[in-house]
């Protein structure tokens, strides 16, 4: 029964979605939900998660929007840091390493952690495979997790470890899919970013803050949109509801094979572009309202002195 207990508050979980199918393997999973802290959990957790990550998964995830995405994320990091001295940055789950490359060009001393590091090592140095290895180059002034936290099996121990790797008053930046956003509510089990079983945890703002605050973090900034990421989620979720269980548009935009003919691929691109045009305005509006597909939280590691006051209370975000 351990898998049916919330790892954050030990509350009993209920079933939110009984059957969610992995598009690659056709294996079926459930998504459970904690009514107390609003965390979602994928169940069961496979014994071997590696088989759910194809080689294509680790490259081209942002397709032609990579530069835009990296530039926006680097802007978030710069807004949270001063330029008084050289700073170290650790990107946990660095993927193919494009964000690290951009950070390096902007003057950061960069380090990465990636379970499958081959692609990242082609363009950036200092990429290891575990947090334990990354400890030797810490502490870090900034640690980023761009859509990697939801993939972690050991959620609470990982946050505890990340806190120990941050320098005093260092900043943790976390981006995750917003399971309480408008698209997630509207599309339900067809929502692109459920992505079971690779996404093992499904966060709202409330559950993400609940995860961070007991481990020495105070939330400083909150953003609820990455426009192109949210728009892709809207478009593909709409197409999935219309019958595209292969998620073809998403695969085509991220450079992955669909197994279809060129003619059918062209049709799927056209359908996806129509979905993007229809969805652009609501995606923008819901992002501004805090109901977008993405939560980005910046949390500062608080000092020892602050822990004796009210710093451990959940902030109003």
Image: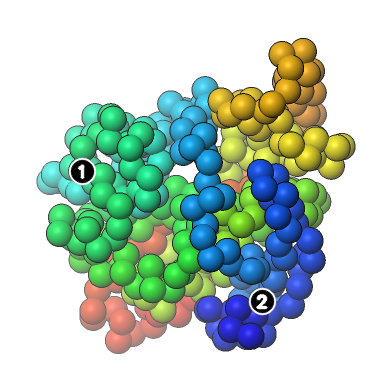
| Residue 178, position as x, y percentages in the image | 62, 55
Instruction: Of the two numbered discs 1 and 2 on the same chain, state the one appearing first in sequence.
Output: 2
Q: Is residue 117 left or right of residue 27?
A: left
Q: Is residue 92 left or right of residue 249?
A: left
Q: Quadrant of residue 306?
A: bottom left
Helix, strand or loop status at disc 1: loop
Helix, strand or loop status at disc 2: loop
Q: Report whether residue 64 is seen.
A: yes
Q: Report whether residue 201 is seen.
A: no
Q: Residue at x 38, y 45 (%)?
A: 116
Q: Is residue 67 above or below residue 81?
A: above
**Hey, which residue is sitting farthest right in the picture?**
242
Q: Is residue 180 left or right of residue 69?
A: right
Q: Residue at x 25, y 63 (%)?
A: 132
Q: Is residue 175 above or below residue 30?
A: above
Q: Is residue 118 left or right of residue 21?
A: left
| Tag shown at residue 259 | none
Badge 2 is on which residue? 34
Q: Quadrant of residue 256?
A: top right
Report crowding for label 1: few under 14, some 14 to 19, many 20 or more residues within 10 A (C-alpha).
some
60 and 146: which is toward the camera: 60
298 and 192: which is toward the camera: 192
**How many tags in the picture?**
2
Q: State which quarter of the image contains the N terminus.
A: bottom right
Q: Quadrant of residue 165?
A: bottom left
Q: What distance separates the C-alpha of mark 1 from that of mark 2?
A: 38 Å
Q: Residue at x 41, y 79 (%)?
A: 214
Q: State which quarter of the image contains the C terminus.
A: bottom right
| Mark 1 or 2: the one toward you | 1
Badge 1 is on which residue? 126
| Residue 154, position as x, y percentages in the image | 45, 70
């Amino acid at each position: 029964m351990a898998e049916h207990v919330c790892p954050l508050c030990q509350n009993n979980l209920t079933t939110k979605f009984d059957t969610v199918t992995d598009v690659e393997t056709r294996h079926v999973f459930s998504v459970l939900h904690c009514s107390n802290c609003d965390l979602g959990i994928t169940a069961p957790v496979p014994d071997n998660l590696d088989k759910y990550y194809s080689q294509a998964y680790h490259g081209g995830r942002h397709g032609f929007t990579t530069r835009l995405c990296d530039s926006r994320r680097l802007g978030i990091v710069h807004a949270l840091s001063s330029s008084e001295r050289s700073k170290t940055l650790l990107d946990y789950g660095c993927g193919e390493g494009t964000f690290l490359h951009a950070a390096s060009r902007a003057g950061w001393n960069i380090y990465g952690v990636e379970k499958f590091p081959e692609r990242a090592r082609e363009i950036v140095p200092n990429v290891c495979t575990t947090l334990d290895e990354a400890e030797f180059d810490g502490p870090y002034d900034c640690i980023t997790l761009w859509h990697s936290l939801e993939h972690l099996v050991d959620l609470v121990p990982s946050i505890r470890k990340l806190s120990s790797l941050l320098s005093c008053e260092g900043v943790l930046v976390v981006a995750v899919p917003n399971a309480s956003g408008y698209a997630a509510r509207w599309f339900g089990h067809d929502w692109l970013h459920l992505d079971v079983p690779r996404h093992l945890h499904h966060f709202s703002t409330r559950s993400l803050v609940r995860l961070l605050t007991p481990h020495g973090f105070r939330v400083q900034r909150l953003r609820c949109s990455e426009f192109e990421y949210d728009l892709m989620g809207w478009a593909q979720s709409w197409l999935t509801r219309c019958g595209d269980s292969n998620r073809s548009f998403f695969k085509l935009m991220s450079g992955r094979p669909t197994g279809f003919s060129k003619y059918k691929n062209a049709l799927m691109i056209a359908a996806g572009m129509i979905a993007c045009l229809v969805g652009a305005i609501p995606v923008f509006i819901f992002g501004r309202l805090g109901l977008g597909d993405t939560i980005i939280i910046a949390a500062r590691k608080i000092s020892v002195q602050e822990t004796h006051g009210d710093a451990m209370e959940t902030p109003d975000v």
